[in-house]
Image (spheres, rainbow, N blue to C red):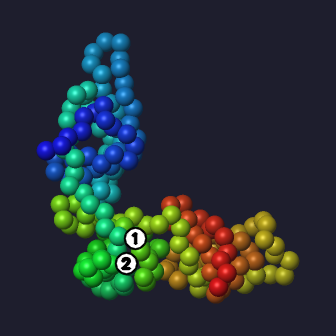
Amino acid sequence: MAVYEVSDFRKGLKVEIDGVPWVIVDFQHVKPGKGNAFTRTKLKNLMTGANLEKTFKSGEKFNIPDMVQKEMQFLYKDEGGFNFMDTTNYEQIQLSAENVGTAANYLIENLTINILFFNGKAIGLDLPNSVVLKIVETDPGVRGNTVSGGSKPAKLQTGAVVQIPLHLKEGDLIKVDTRTDEYIEKMNK
């Protein structure tokens, strides 16, 4: 079985600790004047989203998690969760609201995303960096509002709320950054 050592640590590296997949968010190799070298790490649990700060001794070994990413298409949401389809073999899977998390704010029908599988079980997803969504509710623009300066909240078709420039109105399409929840630009219809 392939393994990583502490010296292999880098941001974004996925490791398996006690049978659970984690991703390294941050790390720092420390070589004190006396004693053994060690590495301070910040880890994120890929199953639950929980964060953990842990120190590892130099030379410790970790299994490489059995993880696969598949490109899938979002179909719909129902009482059971979020439904996705593999575009190559039309196989469908369902993720719970806990697994989807805040990504639900950006899921629109037919959106293609990457689903993360651990030991054959779907555990999460990676959204594209930006998505185009329609404004369904916002305060009307006032004469004199220009492209620059000021912002107002807008509710999007998925239920997400983002700050937008004052001149935008209901029905406009906008591009939103899924990593920062920020307005990027107005899109043409």
Question: Does the residue at mark 2 contact the one at mark 1 (Cβ under 8 Å)?
Answer: yes
Camera sees residue 139: no
Q: If the image is split into quadrants, where does the C terminus sit?
A: bottom right
Vertical comparison of 183 with 14: above or below:
below
- Extreme-front residue of the structure: 88
Q: Is residue 77 left or right of residue 185?
A: left
Instruction: Determine the secondary structure under disc 2.
Output: strand
Q: Residues within 10 Å of mark 2 (few under 14, many from 20)?
A: many
Q: Of residues 122 and 96, which is closer to you in this image? A: 122
Q: Where residue 113 is drawn, which disc sits there?
A: 1
List x then y, in percent, for residue 75: 36, 84
Q: If the image is split into quadrants, where does the N terminus sit?
A: top left
Instruction: Determine the secondary structure under disc 1.
Output: strand
Vertical comparison of 105 with 21: above or below:
below
Q: Of residues 155 and 59, which is closer to you in this image? A: 59
Residue holding disc 2: 73
List x then y, in percent, for residue 23: 32, 49
Q: Is residue 25 left or right of residue 130?
A: left
Vertical comparison of 30 with 65: above or below:
above
Instruction: Tell me which numbered mark, 2 or 1, is placed earlier along the sequence.
Output: 2
Tell me the amino acid under the disc marked 2: Gln
At a point 30% along the width and 77% down the height, the residue shown is: 88
Quarter of the rendering containing residue 140: bottom right
Vertical comparison of 92 with 121: above or below:
below
